[in-house]
């Protein structure tokens, strides 16, 4: 009986130890934030609700996503209403109190940095715009580093037993990322001052960082597909403004871009919007490498 008591105590302590070191469950709305979590918390169980081949504006709140959110310790999303059409539904149906509070288990990347293109007010006539600013902040490497630091602090808050580990991981990531920024900027000097026409404002931050000018948009209004009359106007714009490429993301319809590319005799470039948007984009570093390589290879 004495031996059995010791065995039970040892088993209980082992179980407690395993519970203490149980991997954090993280639900990411987009693959870029799943990748960022893996940089800071490589032992975490990370699930991405979307892929780079899906438009994160328009996702169905599927039962499988509800189940994943129900088990999550932390939810990491772009924010700025990018997921307004589906994230609130998931939160309601998952009924997970841990991921409802923005000071605890709910983390919005855009709330950690200054966003571009904020609007005082919006209405339906303006199309698919974001009052809180452009949500695609992951394509500004300096903003992404600020987001990484804030995320490290949030991970430490949610999982304090691993706080030292998260700080160490952040320091490693910061060092590597700063070196990569310097390398990317040197490599992309040839892109400065180039004029492009792009689909939506998906690469607003990337273009600003690399000093590329988006002189027009394939969408007549945000969220609307290119029309025949709009494409005809863009053709004139492409000729008059010395546009050098048409830029799309990995999930956008290519037909309008192909039409314009053919008639303006400029290349159409499909850039990965996130991790997995093409074969080369396997993590945040290779995503940036791939985007810059594709722009340079297009003769930008």
Image (tube, grey):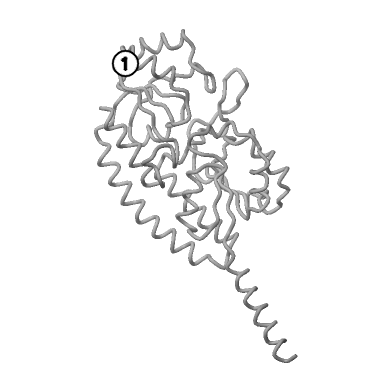
**Count of numbered circles on the image:** 1
Which residue position is annotated with label 1?
241
From the viewer's side, name the closer residue of 107 and 284.
Answer: 284
From the viewer's side, name the closer residue of 238 and 131.
Answer: 238
From the viewer's side, name the closer residue of 242 and 113.
Answer: 242
Quarter occupied by the C terminus:
top left
Label 1 secondary element: loop
Classify 14 as above or below 98.
below
Quarter occupied by the N terminus:
bottom right
The residue most toward the bottom is: 2
In the picture, measured across the screen, residue 287 lies left or right of residue 51, that is: left
Q: Position of residue 231 (x, y in %)?
A: 43, 12
Q: Position of residue 57 (x, y in %)?
A: 57, 32
The crowding category of the residue bearing disc 1, from other C-alpha atoms within 10 Å (few below 14, some 14 to 19, many at least 20), is few
In the picture, measured across the screen, residue 41 lies left or right of residue 267, that is: right
Q: Position of residue 50 (x, y in %)?
A: 55, 39
Classify 228 as above or below 143.
above
Q: Position of residue 246 (x, y in %)?
A: 36, 22
Give the residue displayed 54% in from the left and 41% down from the top. Answer: 78
From the viewer's side, name the closer residue of 220 and 295.
Answer: 295
């Amino acid at each position: 009986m004495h031996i059995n008591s010791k065995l039970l105590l040892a088993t209980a302590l082992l179980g407690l130890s395993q519970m203490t070191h149980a991997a954090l469950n993280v639900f990411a709305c987009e693959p870029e934030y799943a990748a960022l979590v893996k940089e800071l918390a490589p032992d975490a169980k990370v699930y991405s609700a979307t892929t780079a081949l899906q438009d994160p504006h328009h996702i169905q709140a599927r039962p499988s996503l509800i189940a994943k959110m129900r088990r999550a310790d932390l939810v990491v999303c772009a924010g700025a209403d990018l997921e307004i059409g589906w994230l609130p539904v998931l939160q309601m149906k998952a009924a997970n109190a841990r991921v409802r509070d923005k000071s605890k288990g709910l983390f919005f990347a855009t709330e950690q940095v200054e966003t571009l293109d904020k609007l005082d007010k919006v209405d339906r006539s303006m199309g698919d715009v974001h009052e809180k600013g452009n949500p695609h902040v992951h394509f500004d490497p300096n903003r992404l580093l600020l987001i990484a630091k804030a995320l490290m602090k949030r991970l430490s808050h949610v999982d304090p037993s691993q706080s030292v580990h998260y700080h160490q991981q952040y320091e490693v990531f910061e060092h590597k990322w700063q070196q990569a920024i310097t390398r990317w900027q040197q490599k992309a000097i040839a892109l400065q001052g180039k004029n492009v026409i792009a689909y939506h404002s998906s690469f607003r931050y990337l273009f600003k960082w690399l000093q590329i000018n988006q002189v027009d948009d394939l969408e007549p209004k945000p969220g609307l597909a290119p029309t025949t009359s709009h494409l005809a106007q863009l053709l004139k714009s492409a000729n008059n403004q010395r546009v050098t490429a048409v830029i799309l993301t990995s999930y956008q319809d290519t037909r309008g871009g192909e039409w314009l590319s053919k008639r303006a005799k400029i290349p159409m470039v499909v850039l990965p919007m996130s991790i997995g948007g093409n074969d080369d984009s396997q993590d945040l570093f290779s995503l940036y490498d791939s985007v810059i390589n594709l722009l340079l290879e297009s003769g930008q």
